[in-house]
Image (cartoon, rainbow, N blue to C red):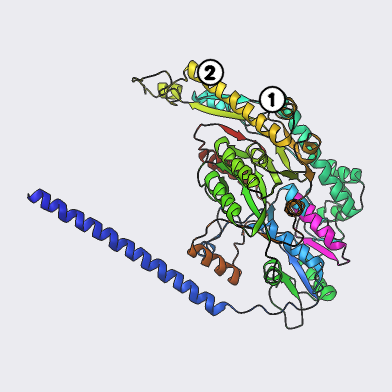
Amino acid sequence: MFKALFGFIGRVLYYTWRWLDALRRGFLTLVFLLVIGVIIALVWRPEAELPEGSVLVLRPAGALVEQARLEDPLELLRPAGSRVSQTSLRNLLDAVNAARDDSRIRALVIETDQLSAGGLSKLAELRAAIEAFKESGKPVIARGERFSQGQYYLASVADEVHLSPDGFVLLRGLARYVTYFKNALDTLGIKVHVFRVGEYKSFSEPFTRTDMSEEDRANSRDLLDGLWNVFREDIAASRGLEPEALDHYIMDYGAALSAAGGDAAQAAVAAGLVDRLSTRDEWRTLLRQRYAVDGEDEAEEGDDGLRAVGVSRYLSHVRSQPTPDAKVAVLVAQGSIVDGSGSPGSVGGDALARLIRDVREDDSIKALVIRIDSPGGSAWASELIRRELEVTRAAGKPVVASMSSTAASGGYWIAAGADEIWAHPVSLTGSIGIFAMIPNFAEPFERLGLTVDGVATGPLAGAFDPRRPVEPMAAEAFQIAIEHGYRRFIDTVARARDMPPREVDLAARGQVWTGEAASKLGLVDGLGGLNDAVLAAAARAGLSEFDVVWPEGRLSPRDLLLRRFSEILGLQRVDTAPATVSALGQLLTGLQRDAEALLEWNDPQHLYTHCLCEGP
């Protein structure tokens, strides 16, 4: 009796404490949101009119991405650590495109020092927008303390390029080197069982080989040559150089340095890569004299009438204008494709499928563009997303796929659900294939004196237990399943592209293509950027006037308030580390990124369609 009584009292106290704790946390959250709301009310003020003669300043920071993550302002108060800031390509494109025909904007200034990463196709799209801006007759001027390859590719589109007197222009070409783990795994006694279809499907090779296969080497060579040709020809055209002159600077950089007495900045001037050398103060003085712009302050008008406006502030003016009722939605699939909701930086199959359904059921949205920047991942999640796109088309809403830097393997599987596929000439796509990897730790267990024994009700029960050798029958069954998955991938693409399966197979087998090469193979419909895809979707929906919206899922009231807070205060993480990272830092960062990516692999059938490729 007493035991039952004490048990009852214990349960009452337990649930009472849980209720009080939930009430406490809810109260603290409410207080936090109230404080944020008060701060917003105190600091918010209506935007002043954008003055005539303003200059748009582009300072992309961190990685150039399709969709920047939501940054918690509290995180911004902490020292910058492993998380790198992000800049939305969409915002830069919108700002440059709007400024082209905006009489209030007189010039464009580009400063690349904080840009640390950006796929070649993203940079090329931004360059194309700046080229269109130049056609309006407005000048473009750029400067860098030093130029990495990506930074210079962006800056070279300017009418005038400045470099610090102590800087350099580092053009190295493109390379793809892979770390192979087979010897290390053999030493540890770890076996990796790989099941795949496609001799060019190289993702699993680092675990099964000690060097690059001939198929992977040939495909990589063709891919890098195609990308590099675009890179060098774009720069040569912008700078009025012959591509061979650029080749000479890169291939014999030592001679260029010697001719300049070891001065890397003067070597860049002599090669025609930059126009002038200027220190920071000289740069600011030049901007004031030429454009009446304060190069340090992008948000405020100085006492001497200087006019400089940053992207965020400019877009707040542009996007406040009335828009048409009809909408074209752009959904972003950025990162590896995983089952479930996914985490920031990945494409959750369930989450994106739910977003597609929301778009389909919104009567104001007349067409959908799926913007893909993904090397693939879970075959299950890829098919889930593709099917939702197919259902959206069946419901009468056009769907157009737009490829960013990478839309390969699972990324291409998603694209197959669209009415049309658009790719940038230097997008990475294809890699149509499928594989699975099963690790086995039986030998290390044996070395440690650990043994595994037990019983099972069938030959497949525990067949892929990593502590035991893989059963031959299970391995055979898995390979059969992989081959079926590959045929399904081929058939899906064949139906979507109206191509014979045999013709798709010739372009598949895991081969990676540039967007330009893929268009010749019939894998994409058009070559162009996001704006081209949006116009194609609008044309299919019969729209002449429309607004472009970017649904991002169902943000909580807290997240919405935090986003508004960040926008009003102009908060942004600024990296303390230079844009050029040390070799050791690059190695450690790459290993950490690869390990984190492997931990996200959660396909329920362990089948993956992933490309060992990233846009340069």
Quick one: label 1, few (<14), some, or many (20+) residues within 10 Å? some
Quick one: label 2, few (<14), some, or many (20+) residues within 10 Å? few
Residue at screen point 71% across, 39% down = 429
Q: Secondary structure at mark 2?
A: helix
Rendering coords of residue 351 (x, y %): 53, 49
Amino acid type at image mark 1: Ser
Question: In the drawing, does residue 404 fall left or right of residue 31?
Answer: right
Front residue (pair 426, 576) = 426
Q: Which residues are magenta?
A: 126-155
Residue at screen point 74% across, 30% down = 507
Residue 143 magenta: yes
- The reply to whether residue 208 is in sight is no
N-term mark: 1 or 2: 1
Rendering coords of residue 358 (x, y %): 57, 53
Q: Which mark is residue 446?
A: none
**Circle 2 residue:** 476
| CB contact under 8 Å: marks 1 and 2 | no
Residue at screen point 36% across, 68% down = 27
Q: Quadrant of residue 251?
A: top right
